Amino acid sequence: MAVLITGGAGYIGSHMVHEFADAGEPVVVLDNLSNGFRFLLPTPVPFVSGSTGDRTLVSDVIARHGVTAIVHFAASIVVPESVVEPLNYYGNNTMNTLALLDAAIRGGVRQFIFSSTAAVYGTTEETSVSEDSPTAPISPYGKSKLMSEIMLHDAAKAYGLRFVILRYFNVAGADPRMRTGQATPAATHLIKVACETAIGKRPKLEVFGTDYPTPDGTCIRDYIHVSDLVQAHSSSLAYLRSGGPSATFNCGYGHGASVFEVVDSVRRASGRDFPVEVSQRRPGDVPALVANVNRIRAMLPWRPQFQNLDTIVAHTLAWEKQLAARRKPA
């Protein structure tokens, strides 16, 4: 009896693997290593190299490891990239999820946790968005995730599958014990990029747009610590195992920070006044996106431990220093 974690060698997935391993939960990881790294994983955890779109492989993993639940992280996630390469995103995020769902249902899996995104909401006039807010994604990334959500709803009705959809806001931070963190060399996440700039890995930080209708003109996002996020997944699995009906939850803190506020936090933590360059807006970015988290707090015993921007930045910065030392040529 095991939990299959797709994309388990990636940023969020590897944190989930450590979370389950710490709790004694048997897991198996499926990852094609396009954005993942084996060194992020606990050594004893079974690892399978491959794609979620490979039905035969997934079916074999489910049968061989006695998989009873799936936590699906594997996806392409860069919003601007999705605008210029939309078919890649529909292929990897939507079609591969379809293949995974098909193999899961045929293999008798009845509990499925899906890694979705706040990008499904698109541009909104609301100060904070709830799970009942209209979904009108403006990027292929958001659309590809919303299509997968729709498939999950239909599969649940037809085949008895029960699911939790977790709509992430902006994930950041690193494992407080420094066992794992975001290791992708070309990552675009603001806090990681700012920390890389602070330690000299990048020559400057680009800020994309300062003319948004926000207090300082830069985009506002709800940043959630990755350790709190994986706790939401653990709570979701326990909820499904206890018989809870399918549900969708926002994963954020209910308050946001602007790009310039993030920059200030990184400067404080690092003690460095690194260069910042203002550029044009990026396609697909919305001015502000903050989570309404009333539902997840009411329905799950989830209580975040790291909901402070300076804490998130401190953990990210410590991880980036460790990662830089690991990759430094001998």
Image: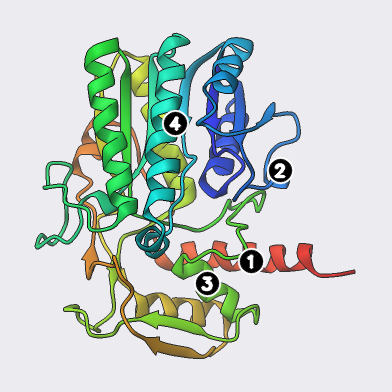
Q: CA distance from mark 1 to mark 3?
A: 10 Å
Residue 234: mark = 4
Q: Earlier in the sequence, mark 3 or mark 4?
A: 3
Q: Is residue 60 above or below residue 38?
A: above
Going by the numbered disc 4, the residue's amino acid type is Ser
Q: Is residue 104 above or below residue 79?
A: above
Q: Earlier in the sequence, mark 2 or mark 4?
A: 2
Residue drawn at (39%, 38%) of the image: 232
Q: CA distance from mark 4 to mark 1?
A: 26 Å
Q: Earlier in the sequence, mark 1 or mark 3?
A: 3
Q: Farthest residue to the right: give it.
A: 330
Q: Secondary structure at mark 2?
A: helix
Q: For mark 2, what is the residue?
A: 38
Q: CA distance from mark 3 to mark 2?
A: 22 Å
Residue drawn at (30%, 31%) of the image: 300
In this picture, residue 314 sits left or right of residue 126: right
Q: Position of residue 134 (x, y in %)?
A: 11, 47
